[in-house]
Amino acid sequence: MSIIATIKIILKAMAANKVRTGLTVLGMVIGIASVIIVFSAGEGINGLILSQIESFGGSDMIETEIKVPSAKKGGEMQAGANLAMGVQITTLILDDMDDINKLPNVADSYAGIMAQEQVSYGNELRKAYLFGATASFIDLDQSEIESGRFFTEAEDKSLSQVAVLGYKIKEKLFGESDPIGRYIKIRKEKFRVIGVLKERGAVMVVDFDDFIYAPIRTLHKKIMGIDYVTFFMHKVADTKLINQTQEEIRYLLRENHNLPHPEGATDWQGVPKDDFRVVSMTESMEIMETVTGAITLLLLAIVAISLIVGGVGIINIMHVVVTERTAEIGLRKAVGANYRDIMLQFLIESILITILGGIIGVVLGVAISYLISLGANSYGLDWHFNVPLRAYIVSLGFSAFFGIIFGVFPARNAAKLDPIEALRHE
């Protein structure tokens, strides 16, 4: 019997049992749609995280941040964890940044520290976040001035009490009125507002629109009573030398912090580890890509379970089909159908069901992925809709694979039936 004639028989059988066929297809639809959604969500999350990292600086930026030194591998805490646990690292100071700026491939740097204080204007009293920075912040960061100006290096060094407001904190304190030239109080100190930044939105978990920006030395001396910083951001002149520059920064800071260099150490355990961490933005992106890739694989492993469940549904349905059509199989074998014909009929039926489920699953998965991207963007997230080519290959590949694997066993059982016994079945 020809393939075309076999397919016609299969389609008639599927049409005669629409509910059973539909339920079988549904199992594959759910599994395949889940594969598409997981791949698309993985791409969306990865793009979102990378765009957030890029907002701190491009591929030509290096970050130096505080961390708790540890003798154990992987035991260091980064800046965010340090602050959350109340750990204070006081060794990173502005003199370190000045020394780093002398390195040949470092074009410029800015220092930063964050705090939270009571801020007031008139009758408005708010708990606000302070961002102490050097004047070069506005040149290296992606923040932009909407009105007024940013503070200068001279104002920073002279401990001038000036402030630049983020978009949201300006709205909270001043509403629609112009804040330029007016004074706000941070603790008991008056700061003159000299500028307002354009709306930027949240980056990772940090909402830069809710910050009050002030000269770092002014905050050190008049508000916080400290002389250290939390991090530096460095712009390199040549990105090809970024790894070399990272090592130069590490070497310099170990010298400044009186830490021995590991090259000459015979006992690694006795060498104090760095109290700082130097990482490029490119390196951060690679780390996050690895993390999101691992999460995607984990989710795919979970989705594989639903695909297996769908496959088990197919094998069960095909067994029922074989049982219901035993007499038909016996008749076909009696009039000349051989093992190959029967085997091919039920195998093709199984493959058609899974391919149909695969196609519907792909369409459904793409549609849901698109709706997810629309929902994420409506919440202000930079979520790009993207279904990578490998998602289609994997989903349709899974569909064909399960169609063959879970169709072979019932097809073999049908093909092995004795024609006389089969005819007596009814």
Image (cartoon, rainbow, N blue to C red):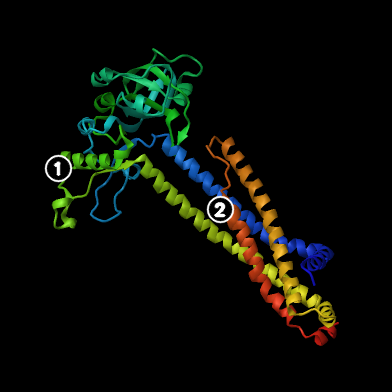
Type of residue at label 1?
Asn
Is residue 88 among what the camera can see?
no
Q: Is residue 182 above or below residue 333?
A: above
CA gap between label 1 and label 2 equals 51 Å
Q: Is residue 75 above or below residue 323?
A: above
Type of residue at label 2?
Arg
Residue sitting at x 60%, y 44%: 372
Q: Is residue 150 left or right of residue 422?
A: left
Check residue 390 in the rendering and tell me which mark sits there, or answer none: 2
Q: Is residue 364 left or right of residue 182?
A: right
Q: Identify the residue position indicated by label 1 in the image.
A: 258
Mark 1, residues whose alpha carbon is within 10 Å: few (<14), some, or many (≥20)? few
Q: Earlier in the sequence, mark 1 or mark 2?
A: 1
Residue at the far front: name it.
Answer: 2
Residue sitting at x 43%, y 34%: 55
The number of discs equals 2
Q: Nearer the viewer, residue 45 or 196?
A: 45
Q: Is residue 238 left or right of residue 17?
A: left
